[in-house]
Image (tube, helix red, strand yellow):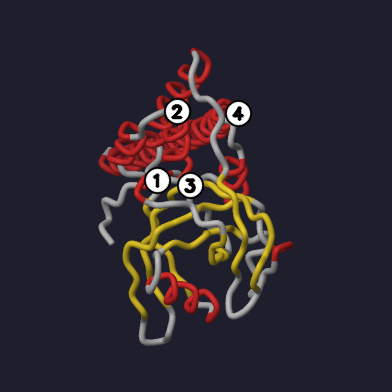
Amino acid sequence: MSENLNAQQLRVPDVLGVLPLRSAVIFPGAVVPLGAGRASSVRLIEEALAGGRLVGAVMQRDPAEDAPGLAGLHPVGTVAVIHKALKQADGTMRLVVQGLWRFRVVDLVQETPYLRARIERVEEGAADGLEVEALARSATSLFQKVVSLSPTLPDELTNIAAAAEGPGAIADAIGASLPALPPALKQELLETADVTQRLKKLVGALSKEAEVLELGSKIQSEVQSEVSKTQREYYLREQLKAIQKEL
């Protein structure tokens, strides 16, 4: 299947195999590398590859649980298409998936050999008006600021938000791109279908992250300045000792 697959070419199935994720959230539009080690997950992926290549990616509530049931999963996940998959020598799998749409788990219809659930698509609310446009701009601006302040994030990351079409897609692109956002917050953003509310939550998180990075940069600068001052004072003392020896 082509990596340029358009989501409109696919239909949301009524029943879908569920891929539990220990501590990862996949957003619509995001292309994500994943690893699958559980026998149930490997079986699901193999059968998905032989069919429509779709899985329902859902973060589990307890990352340590090996076999979560319905109660062990968050209620909202993302329908994802498998673009690439490679089985390793140890039986685990490496794959690349792309998020397509949000969905809600209605109920389980199968528990073995892997979970299958009846699902329904989660539609976004209206995303127009001055407020949502202002929030989208604020989120984009803050995201650029966070990337510029972070010593680990590449500047090219800002292109992801710039390429997103529409306020909802911008929120999802930014949410998917920031490793500093905790999984619980990413899950909350995924579950927030109302675009305005999603952007408000994202702007709050980005503002906090920018403040933390700015404070960290300030502290580092002050420490470096103090170290430089100490080094200068030591150098001057040594020079003075050398001069006094000559007198």
What SS does tag 4 mark? helix
Give the distance between the C-alpha atoms of the residues marked 1 and 4, in whole angstroms.
Answer: 19 Å
The residue identified by callout 3 is 101
The residue identified by callout 1 is 29
Amino acid on which the number 2 mark rests in the picture: Pro
The residue identified by callout 2 is 167
- Seen at 39% across and 54% down, the residue is 98
Instruction: Please report whichever mark, 3 or 4, sits nearer to the chain's N-terminal start.
Output: 3
**Do residues under tags 3 and 4 come within 8 Å of each other at their CB atoms?**
no
Give the distance between the C-alpha atoms of the residues marked 1 and 3, in whole angstroms.
Answer: 8 Å
Instruction: Note whether 89 is above or below 167 in the view shown.
Output: below
Between tags 2 and 3, which lies in front? Answer: 3
Instruction: Please report whichever mark, 4 or 2, sits nearer to the chain's N-terminal start.
Output: 2
Give the distance between the C-alpha atoms of the residues marked 3 and 4, in whole angstroms.
Answer: 18 Å
- Seen at 52% across and 59% down, the residue is 57
Instruction: Note whether 195 is above or below 2 in the view shown.
Output: above
Amino acid on which the number 1 mark rests in the picture: Gly
Give the distance between the C-alpha atoms of the residues marked 2 and 3, in whole angstroms.
Answer: 15 Å
Instruction: Note whether 234 is above or below 31 in the view shown.
Output: above
Q: Which quarter shows the C terminus? A: top left
